[in-house]
Amino acid sequence: MRKDQKNEGPDEPMKKATKKATKKATKKATKKATKKATKKVTKKVTKKKVTKKKVTKKKVTKKKPATKEEARRKFREDKRRTPYFLGDRVSAELTFKGGDAGELKRRGLPQLSDALELSQALALPEAVSSSGPDFKKGADRVAWLCYHRRAARVDHYNRFHIPKRKGGKRRIASPKPLMRHAQSWILENIVEHLEPHTGVATAWRRGLSIKDNAERHVGKAIVVRIDIKDFFPTITWKRVRGLFKGCGYNQGVATLLALLCTDADRRPIELDGDRLYVAQGERVLPQGACTSPGLANYVARWLDLRIKGLADSIGFNYSRYGDDLIFSHEERRGRVDILLRAVYTILKDEGFEPNEKKTVVMRQHQRQMVTGILVNQELRISRRDCRRFRAIVHRCQTEGVESVSKSMNRDALAYVNGFLAYVNMVNADQAVALERLLDDAGLGPLKGSR
């Protein structure tokens, strides 16, 4: 028998067993009660959260229109402000969000964020069509002018041909009054604030003329002229849209402005008694729109920058008058071959196509013509143009001004005096001699032609 067993009483084992059972029962009961209480509290808290969430959701729920008529009215208003479709292949970026207000302010351009604001800025006048008053107003009229259809019942341009100086015909698209009004506003408020490469581009800019372009190349050993093929038709509406986006306008407004400034060439057809105007290709800058020259100049600024860098590196002077690239060099050994290859490469890289058939290299012993002006020794009008002028003056003297005007399909006297003013701008000495010829013929210059 162990020593500790000797000291235990007869009831000692019973006490220990009771104590152990009590402890176990208490522990079990406590655990059960704690679990039950925790479950109850958790359920209560979860219920409160759910209730709170429902209340919050109810607060942010938008109020639905009371009637279908109100819903339609709201839809029409939203459509006027932010049109979502303006024709196939032109509606992908009609998103009227974003833009760079700071960039617009820096450039001095009007802040426009949607079609309604553009419509208010354009302030389109009331127009009357052949079928009666135009019912479209405000932003609807902007959308009507912008809408692109492959086959349309209305053409916003008058299209005709004029003869080119060296043969062939040039197709002109002259905007009709409503489109002309919109484009005039864009020209005055946006396009004229866009500066092209100021040291190179000399066409279609205030205060500059063909004389300024020709003066840079007077008395040079070599003069090179490179022509860009289809200059305006090469500049597509996507490039114009990118231009307006770069100015700070959001994608939607940039799309509207680009659609107002571009159009596809269209041909009229008759179908089931209706006259339709069918688009012949992609939307491009139309020759005849007042916005086209300024936009073309600005699109070509990177072209000018690259070619100017090239020309400087090999000793050539460079200027651009519209689609004519003019280069000149002091020495007769200037590397014309390197120049031509590099310029052709840059033109293609910038999305233009050189008209290689019209490329001319003029040496000092040849007639060096820059934008219709001789530049060999000084600025002069060519002998051929002077002879044509003398011939018209002689006909006016012998046949009469009215007869010559009828054969020329223009006012002969206005033409003669206009040419005299042009000669005076280029070379005053030549103008004096031609003016003497007019006096001898008894015609005399119009007042203010000099």
Image: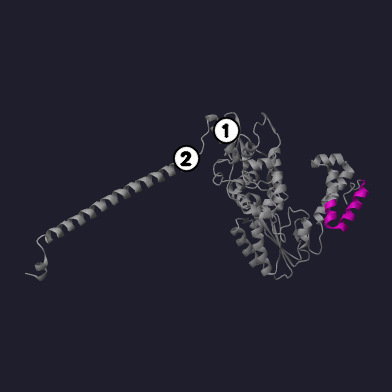
Task: Report crowding for label 1: few under 14, some 14 to 19, many 20 or more residues within 10 A (C-alpha).
Answer: few
Q: Position of residue 333 (x, y in %)?
A: 70, 71
The residue indicated by pointer 2 is 58
Q: Quadrant of the N terminus?
A: bottom left
Chief SS of the magenta region: helix
Q: Secondary structure at mark 1?
A: helix
Q: Nearer the viewer, residue 296 or 39?
A: 39
Work out which residue is located at the far left of the displayed protein and give it.
1
Sequence-earlier tag: 1 or 2: 2
Q: Magenta stretch?
A: 421-442
- Mark 2 surroundings within 10 Å by alpha-carbon count, few (fewer than 14), some (14 through 19), many (20 or more): few
Q: Is residue 421 left or right of residue 62?
A: right
Location of residue 225 (image quadrant)? bottom right
Q: How many marks?
A: 2
Which residue is more in the foreground, 155 or 50?
Answer: 50
Q: Residue at x 71, y 48 (%)?
A: 189
| Disc 2, SS | helix
Is residue 174 in view?
no
Instruction: Indicate the position of residue 439 as horizontal and vertical percent values.
Output: 93, 49
48 lies above or below 209: above
Q: Position of residue 182 (x, y in %)?
A: 69, 42
Q: Are marks 1 and 2 in contact (CB under 8 Å)?
A: no
Above or below residue 262? Residue 426 is below
Q: Residue at x 23, y 53 (%)?
A: 28
130 within the magenta span: no
Reading the image, the residue beneath label 1 is 73
Is 404 on the left or on the right of 201, as rendered? Answer: right
Disc 1 residue type (three-letter): Arg
What's the residue at 67%, 51% (across, down)?
295
- Report how far apart the C-alphas of labels 1 and 2 lie in the structure: 25 Å
